[in-house]
Amino acid sequence: MLRDSPDCAVIQAQWKVLEQALKDKKTRSIGVINFCQSALECVLETATVKPAINYYMLHVGMGRDAHGLRTFGESRGIRTFAYGAVGEPGPNVELFESGVLKRIGEMHGKSVEEVAVRWVLQSGAAVSVRPTTEFGLGASTCSNSSSKCDAGLKMRAGSFGWSLSEEEMKELDGMTSPDDNPTLFSSSGCPNSFGMPKFIIEKLKKG
């Protein structure tokens, strides 16, 4: 998968290399990571093979369409591969304290996290998940010998074994908070991208 660049010519040149790798059977498919609409428009201008997927953030509160990015990409055959079902760059407290997610989870005997992951899957997107919710920038408690991680993976795999009702999906679809930029980790070529220096300063101020 290709990350975007502020320079459209760079995106197009890099994508051409990936297309050649696909032609040479060095990979079975090629896609992009955190491509906003303008970055997608750039790559599509010269692409002979469209990206198979766009990997970006999607969670409850952002809406199923992720600020129009999903409609734009999927209408052009680019499927959605979501990360951050419970937030990024760390777990979103607002999601875990959501009365709506708690209530729905209790109805199914599931946790808030399981509801959040199931919502993404049931919306028709692929989703990547972390083994635990104990993560953040440069931090993870998972290890090969961690029983907690094993249990977490098993729980997440169980997301395919149950479903939300149509009414529950509509209620979750309609939530407008917490809202995030789906391509938060894009380059400065995309709007409202993640500013690492700004984030660090804010963290230091909070102690």
Image (tube, rainbow, N blue to C red):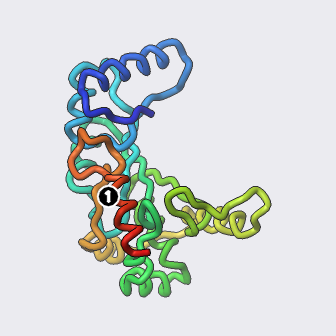
Front one among 7 and 115: 7
| Image quarter hosting the C terminus | bottom left
Front one among 141 and 147: 141
Q: Position of residue 188 (x, y in %)?
A: 26, 42
Instruction: Please rate how many residues cluster around mark 1, counting C-alpha atoms within 10 Å: few if below 14, some from 14 to 19, many from 20.
Output: few
Q: Residue at x 42, y 52 (%)?
A: 82
Callout 1 secondary element: helix
Relative to residue 105, is residue 124 depicted above or below? above
Q: Tag 1: residue type?
A: Lys
Q: Position of residue 125 (x, y in %)?
A: 40, 52
Q: Residue at x 36, y 62 (%)?
A: 201
| Image quarter hosting the N terminus | top left
In the rendered image, the residue lying farthest to the right is: 145
165 relative to 68 in the view: left or right: right
Q: Position of residue 30 (x, y in %)?
A: 44, 29
Relative to residue 60, is residue 168 depicted above or below? below
Q: Which residue is mark 1?
A: 198
5 relative to 207 in the view: left or right: left
Residue 133: image quadrant is bottom right
Front one among 16 and 78: 16
Please count the marks in the image.
1
Q: Residue at x 31, y 36 (%)?
A: 77
Q: Position of residue 167 (x, y in %)?
A: 32, 77
